[in-house]
Amino acid sequence: MLLTDDAPALARTIDPAFRRDIIDGLTRRPRATPPLWFYDRRGSELFEDITDLPEYYPTRTETALLKAHGADFAAAVGAGRAVVEFGAGSARKTPHLLRAIAPAAYVPIDISGDFLRASSAELASAFPALPVIPVVGDFNGPLSLPAAIDGLPRLGFFPGSTIGNMEPDAAVDLLRAMRRLLGPDAMLLIGMDRIKDARRLVAAYDDAAGVTAAFNLNLLTRINRELEGDLPLDGFAHRAIWNDEKARIEMHLEAVRPLHFHVAGQCFDMDAGETIHTESSHKYSPRDERLLLRAGGWQPTREWTDDEGLFTLVLAEAG
């Protein structure tokens, strides 16, 4: 059953935070923009396409873990919790968890309202007895959970290694914010991507079919549409590189020639070879996973990984 959340939906007008983040990001040196602005409707659709690519191992590996360990999750988590999913997107992996643990409610949170409402309606149809209460919002900012789950113990669900998109200090801040939001008796099931061969990592973010490139370049299309921009789409190329020192994949939009363009009434110039850093995806060793969670106020209790050690799901309790 699909319920309406008490929190207001995002306005249909442009979020002033989008304008601020893009202008600030294009002005700073080196240039960088927050990855959350990838996810307009088209960006969300492209990301779902990425998850089906042969090079992109995280989704199929994490999905296999969710399918294989349902009984473990049920034993460790127990029935009757409200599942709160951060950055739910299409919630394609979520049914495996919901079937395993028999929750009392499901609260998906995502910044892309249209995409979230569509996926929530689909999931509510598949689980007609389960209250599904979507919340449109940015999980990096202030949030309120719906009154319908007041008094219920909560399980945070943060799959996909989205935590890796953040700098370590910001990741710790987010984990602490989740801890406060979910409450003292909460648990968290989180996906984290492991450090591995650099060639395999780069291929996952620079696929042969060019879907990840289209996802990256779609940010420019969104800027042009929503912020009166005139960035030349043929003036940029997608780049994915492994930064070994920081243990992360970086995605960039590289100027292929000298560029002059406008965004929201402001002028910008870029030299050939200069980039806009659009996303980082940090990878973790087993030790670093546990250290990050403990720093964020969570005590790891169980973890599950695949035979190749590509990806891990960690269950933690509020510390």
Image (cartoon, helix red, strand yellow):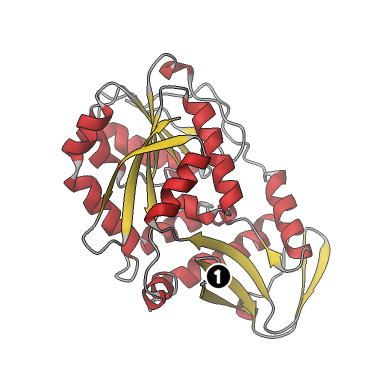
User: Disc 1 designates what residue?
Assistant: 245
Residue 290 x %, y %: 42, 46
Residue at (67, 83) in percent of width and height = 273
Residue drawn at point x = 61 percent, y = 59 percent: 222
Which quarter shows the C terminus? top left
Say whether residue 254 is visible: yes
- Give the left or right position of residue 276, taking residue 46 as reference: right
Q: Nearer the viewer, residue 29 or 1?
A: 29
In this view, the residue in front, 186 or 139, is: 186
Q: Going by the image, does 124 lie left or right of 237?
A: left
Tell me the crowding category of disc 1: few under 14, some 14 to 19, or many 20 or more residues within 10 angstroms, Cα based. few
Residue 267 found in image quarter = bottom right
Quarter of image, res 33: bottom right
In the depicted structure, whether residue 104 falls above or below residue 227 = above
> In the rendered view of the protein, which quadrant contains the N terminus?
top left
Residue visible at 52% across and 41% down? 295
